[in-house]
Amino acid sequence: MLWPVDAKFAAVREALFGNAPGAKQRAQAALEVSKNCDVEFGAAFALAAVGDSIKSRVLVDDLNQRFPEDTCVRFTYLPVVRARMALNRGNSSEAIELLKKAEPYDIAFTCSWFGSFGSLYAPYVRGEAYLASHRYAEAAAEFQKVLDHPGIVFVDPIRVMAHIQLGRTFALAGDKAKAKAAYQDFLTLWKDADSDIAILNEAKAEYAKL
């Protein structure tokens, strides 16, 4: 059995990399062992990222009730997951507004004892919200913020995803040169990755269209 800290990290990884069943399974595995704030956040974010806002909201409500004075919960975890759920509803403006509370802590380490898990999630989700709003310059700046702080984001999967999202942003903005460069950075990082990973195949297909 995975430790809850490993399972929550795995849940987020599977969610971001396009494996919704795996994300849900890992999230449930983590919650069966522990419901500390870091584990609940990881599970809630993973579930929201794969579109399961109903179960994610239950965890968000529990976090809000049990940790009302926790700085990371109030100013990072809750705004990030709530913003992700707003995006699921197609409300990018609400997502941007929700993340204003997290902005002063954008490049701070979270309270998680597992390395830097959860750090720079606010800029990443804000980038998604700007992208959904067709505010491409602002979206690119947020994804670049993730990439500019490797010592904070460390091995978190959003570091990889930021390359792809940056490529998507530049492509939609009509800057094919920068889009190709962003995708190439990702494909170089993942040159030895398993060929059946959903997000890898998506990125290859998107790159081929440029």
Image (tube, rainbow, N blue to C red):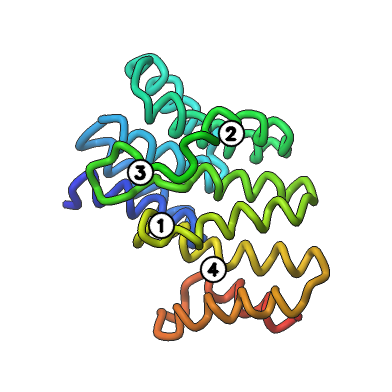
Q: Give the CA distance from mark 3 to mark 4.
A: 26 Å
Q: Is residue 203 left or right of residue 7?
A: right
User: Which sits earlier in the primary sequence, circle 1 or circle 2?
Assistant: 1
User: Which sits earlier in the primary sequence, circle 4 or circle 1?
Assistant: 1
- The amino acid type, in three-letter code, at marker 1 is Arg
Q: Secondary structure at mark 2?
A: helix
Are the residues tagged 3 and 4 within 8 Å (C-beta)? no
Nearest-to-viewer mark from 2 and 3:
3
- State the image quarter where residue 87 is shown: top right
Are the residues tagged 1 and 3 within 8 Å (C-beta)? no
Q: Nearer the viewer, residue 93 or 28?
A: 93
Please name the residue that numbered disc 1 is placed on. Answer: 13
Q: Is residue 38 left or right of residue 142?
A: left
Determine the residue positioned at 64% across, 40% down. 88
User: Which sits earlier in the primary sequence, circle 4 or circle 2?
Assistant: 2
User: Which sits earlier in the primary sequence, circle 2 or circle 3?
Assistant: 2
Determine the residue positioned at 35% across, 16% down. 69
Instruction: Name the mark on residue 87.
Output: none
Nearest-to-viewer mark from 1 and 3:
3
Where residue 85 sits in the image (x, y, percent)? 59, 35
User: Which sits earlier in the primary sequence, circle 3 or circle 4?
Assistant: 3
Please name the residue that numbered disc 2 is placed on. Answer: 99
Where residue 16 sits in the image (x, y, percent)? 49, 56
How packed is label 1: few (under 14 Cα within 10 Å), some, or many (20 or more)?
A: many
Nearest-to-viewer mark from 1 and 2:
2
- The amino acid type, in three-letter code, at marker 2 is Leu
Q: Give the CA distance from mark 4 to mark 1.
A: 11 Å
